[in-house]
Amino acid sequence: PVVEFLRSIGVMDIGRFLTRIPPILGFSVERELLPKWKYLCKVSSDARFEVTKFPAYFSYPLDRVIKPRYEYIAQVKHFPTRLIAVERVISFGDRDFAIKIMRDEDGGIAFREFAETISKPQKKNNKSNNKKRPKQKRATQSFSLLLTEKEGDLK
């Protein structure tokens, strides 16, 4: 089923793909691969290109890593997610993602707090959920750097 799925999404060199991420053969298409693929299609301009370039995308947890980062980019940074390569978004740890990729100057605190709030199930009529959160300030630095920097510049 995994090989059929990869073919269906346009992966041409299945052998190369599998050598780059062998554990994918044990993944559930319905529970793991398809939801991640559908999400990537929403946030990326060319999902097929992105997974071919970075097959490890499928190894990251959707609800704990992938969604929080893309939602942070869109909701907090107000930046189009389609302009950032998937590898840059998810291959770093949370703190490095916030500092090196999103240029946060708070040591990653804003991202950590954001990720915690969206990953927790919201309860209705819970007073703690009605607290006003401090308004996140918009990114002041140009994101053109984000699009042009090479990976080596980030290490």
Image: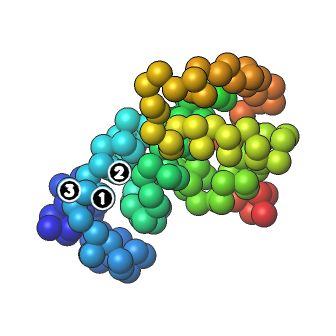
Residue 103, above or below 93: above
Q: Amino acid at mark 3?
A: Glu
- Tag 3: Cα neighbours inside 10 Å, few (<14), some, or many (≥20)? few
Name the residue that disc number 3 marks.
30
The quadrant of the picture occupied by the N terminus is bottom left
Q: Distance from label 3 to label 1 (Cα)?
A: 6 Å
Q: Amino acid at mark 2?
A: Lys
- Disc marking residue 85: none
- Disc marking residue 32: 1
Q: Amino acid at mark 1?
A: Glu
The first of marks 2 and 3 along the sequence is 3
Could you tell me if the residues under marks 1 and 2 are in contact, i.e. CB atoms within 8 Å?
yes
The quadrant of the picture occupied by the C terminus is bottom right
Circle 3 sits in a helix, a strand or a loop, which is it? helix
Q: Distance from label 1 to label 2 (Cα)?
A: 6 Å
> Which of the 4 quarters of the picture holds residue 23?
bottom left
Question: Residue 3, percent across and down?
Answer: 20, 69
Could you tell me if the residues under marks 3 and 1 are in contact, i.e. CB atoms within 8 Å?
yes
Circle 1 sits in a helix, a strand or a loop, which is it? helix
Name the residue that disc number 2 marks.
36
